[in-house]
């Protein structure tokens, strides 16, 4: 996917324009206030191929040294199914989601329950359990 411009709809499908939604997270100018917001910005980073942001928003304890994205995989739609904790005053949270993608000519869905922690005032992705 081409990198969206400020006035494009945000790839996370929040209903906001990219410039008001995930762009400030990806460029580092505004941290995510909630675990769900971080999840949305990470989906957008996958959609636009921003591995730098994905690594920066990953907890150092579980972060891989490198991350290579499959250029044949296009992330199309994010559905937030459930959140637990993860608010502005919480230290941890969970977000259950479905992320729909296309890989070459096949369509697929990743269903995951992700765990997040707030470290030094910033939300970070820890890990997730893939659901059937």
Image: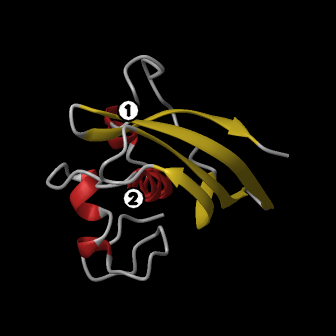
The circle drawn on residue 79 is none
Please indicate whether residue 122 sits to the left or right of residue 79 in the image. Answer: left
Q: How many marks?
A: 2
Pointer 2 local density, CA inside 10 Å: few below 14, some 14–19, many at least 20: many
Residue toward you, 22 or 121: 121
The residue to which callout 2 is attached is 37
On the picture, is 10 further left or further right than 131?
left
Residue at 75% in and 56% down = 109
Q: Earlier in the sequence, mark 1 or mark 2?
A: 2
Residue 29: % across, % down: 14, 54
Dot 1 falls on a residue whose secondary structure is: helix
| Residue 10 in picture, x, y percent from top left | 40, 73
Q: Nearer the viewer, mark 1 or mark 2?
A: 2
Contact? badges 1 and 2 (CB < 8 Å): no
Secondary structure at badge 2 equals: helix
Distance from disc 1 to disc 2, alpha carbons, whole Å, reads 16 Å
Q: Is residue 100 left or right of residue 9?
A: right
Image coordinates of residue 117 in percent, x first then y, are 40, 35
Looking at the image, residue 69 lies above or below residue 4: above
**Res 54 → quadrant:** top left
**Residue ID at (49%, 58%):** 47
Mark 1 Cα-neighbour bin, 10 Å: few <14, some 14–19, many ≥20? some
Instruction: Read off the residue under disc 1.
Output: 55
Which residue ends up furthest to the front in the rendered image?
A: 89
| In this view, 104 is above or below 125 | below
Return the residue nearer the eye: 44 or 40: 40
In the picture as drawn, the residue positioned furthest to the left comes out as 29
Q: Nearer the viewer, residue 69 or 121?
A: 121
């Amino acid at each position: 996917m081409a990198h969206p411009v400020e006035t494009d709809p945000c790839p996370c499908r929040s209903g906001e324009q990219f410039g008001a939604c995930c762009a400030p997270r990806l460029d580092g100018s505004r941290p995510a206030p909630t675990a769900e917001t971080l999840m949305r910005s990470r989906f957008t980073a996958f959609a636009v191929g921003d591995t730098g942001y994905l690594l920066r928003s990953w907890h150092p304890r579980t972060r891989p040294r490198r991350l290579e994205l499959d250029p044949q995989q296009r992330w199309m739609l994010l559905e937030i199914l459930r959140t637990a904790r993860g608010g502005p005053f919480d230290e941890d949270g969970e977000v259950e989601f479905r992320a729909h993608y296309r890989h070459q000519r096949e369509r697929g869905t990743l269903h995951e329950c992700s765990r997040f922690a707030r470290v030094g005032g910033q939300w970070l992705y820890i890990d997730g359990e893939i659901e059937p």
